[in-house]
Image (spheres, rainbow, N blue to C red):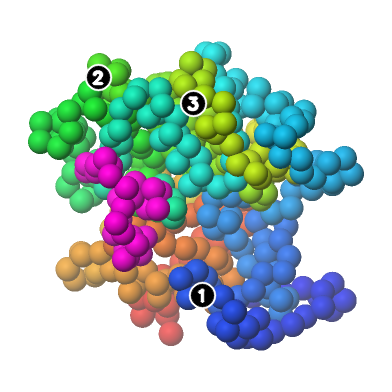
Amino acid sequence: MQTLGAGQQTFSDNAVFLDAREDNVPRGVVTAHPIVINQGKGSEVWDVEGNRYLDFVGGIGVLNVGHNHPAVVAAVSRQLQQVTHACFQVAAYPGYIELAKRLNHAVGGGLPFKSVFFTSGAEAVENAVKIARAHTNRPGIIAFDGAFHGRTLLGCTLTGMSQPYKQNFGPFPGDIFHVPYPNAFHGISEQQALDALETLFAVGILPERVAAIIIEPVQGDGGFLPAPAGFMRALRELTERHGILLICDEVQTGFGRTGKMFAFQHSAIEPDLVTLAKSLGGGLPISGVSGRAHIMDAPTPGGLGGTYGGNALACAAALAVMDLMENDNLIERANLLGARLNARLRQLAGKYACIGEVRGVGFMQAVEIIDLDTRAPDAALTQKILDCACQEGLLLIKCGLYRNTVRFLAPLVTSDSQLEEALHIFDIALARATGRLG
């Protein structure tokens, strides 16, 4: 593992900070790796001891443009000299309006769209539900098994996993329903998922009582599962037939991650509402809902907003991100990196029988880890692989219903040599975790 040279940083000790963390931060906030980060640049980070790591987590999909991109830093620095915060509900400012305009074009593809901004992805999801209910005057929301839509009370109700997100946090909001998500590796076909929707309409809630169906075009925390294009098109047809809104949750998939600006574009559909966050802000907290103008206007004045929503600094960062997406060929880069990563992961799957499946779209790739004998999901081995990778200088995290999937969320600015280095480390981690290497 590489370290910063003398004089580049004042070193401390990870253990000192982690001991203080134990005393001062509740255990409910999990930190995946026993390190404390002090510096970041592009796809690299350094801890307080000066150790270098390749960051293939990217703030869990927040840093598509990398750590401390000079354009983002410059934009925020300029904004700091003007105004940091005024609250858009008190007085408007140019950045918010310009960002809305840019996103309306990017998401709407020429259709009349409007956008509103918040702070977190969960806030965007909650407000999308409010907008859908306001527009349709219907209560029901349908989500999918394995979905992740946030940790707020409504967010974890929409989330299709019981642990760790739901725990004993109930009772949960009503009129929320779940159906299976297509997952060929675990035996759930597109038709079975569509049939489950029809069954729900027959036994759970009439379609004319459903305001919206919310879906991640690629499930994130659920295991990096791409929704087949045919399924997305069938879902769009079904929602239009019943007057149900289609909400695409692009919090993790947006801004080039899947090789398109937004993942729903792979299916050639147009959703009614799109939730955005994570890489929109290039590291600063901002989220939003973009949608068809007449739907977005359903809530009456005062029904939407939030004190920090569309903060001036975050809007400046987001505008810089939009410039980078348009001018730096990052979407093309995502496709190139994704193809190379997928090919190498498939090579590793041929070498290590514990890799049950390689899947993903663009530079959003994952491997599902299974038991060598039973081929059942193996969460313990997955964690061992992650620990070994961290010890060798590569940061990765897990996902999936059974927490047995390793996901790759490296910045789109990752260099060819960094990708090769990361895959070499991952090979070593697999060898160590499976006992091939002492």
Judging by the rendered image, the residue that carries numbered circle 3 is 299
**Viewer can see residue 91:** yes
- Which residue is at the front of the view, 42 or 152? 152
Residue found at x 30% / y 23%: 244
Whichever of labels 1 and 3 marks the residue nearer the N terminus, that label is 1
Which residue is the extreme one toward the top? 111
Question: On the rendered image, what quadrant is the C terminus found in?
Answer: bottom left
312 to 266, vertically: above or below: below
Q: Position of residue 132 (x, y in %)?
A: 40, 28
Badge 1 element: loop
Q: Amino acid at mark 1?
A: Pro
- Marks 1 and 3 sit apart, C-alpha to C-alpha, by 37 Å
Question: Are circles 1 and 2 on residues that touch, CB within 8 Å?
Answer: no
Badge 2 element: helix
Judging by the rendered image, the residue that carries numbered circle 2 is 242
Q: Position of residue 265 (x, y in %)?
A: 45, 26
Taking 81 as reference, is 282 left or right? Answer: left
- Marks 2 and 3 sit apart, C-alpha to C-alpha, by 21 Å
Tell me, for residue 26, which label it has, or none. 1
Point out the stretch of residues depicted in magenta: 153-180
417 to 96, vertically: above or below: below
Tell me, yes or no, whether the highlighted magenta stretch contains residue 313: no
Determine the image quadrant of residue 179: top left
Tell me, for residue 309, which label it has, or none. none
Q: Amino acid at mark 3?
A: Pro
110 to 50, vertically: above or below: above
Q: Amino acid at mark 2?
A: His
Q: Position of residue 258 (x, y in %)?
A: 48, 38
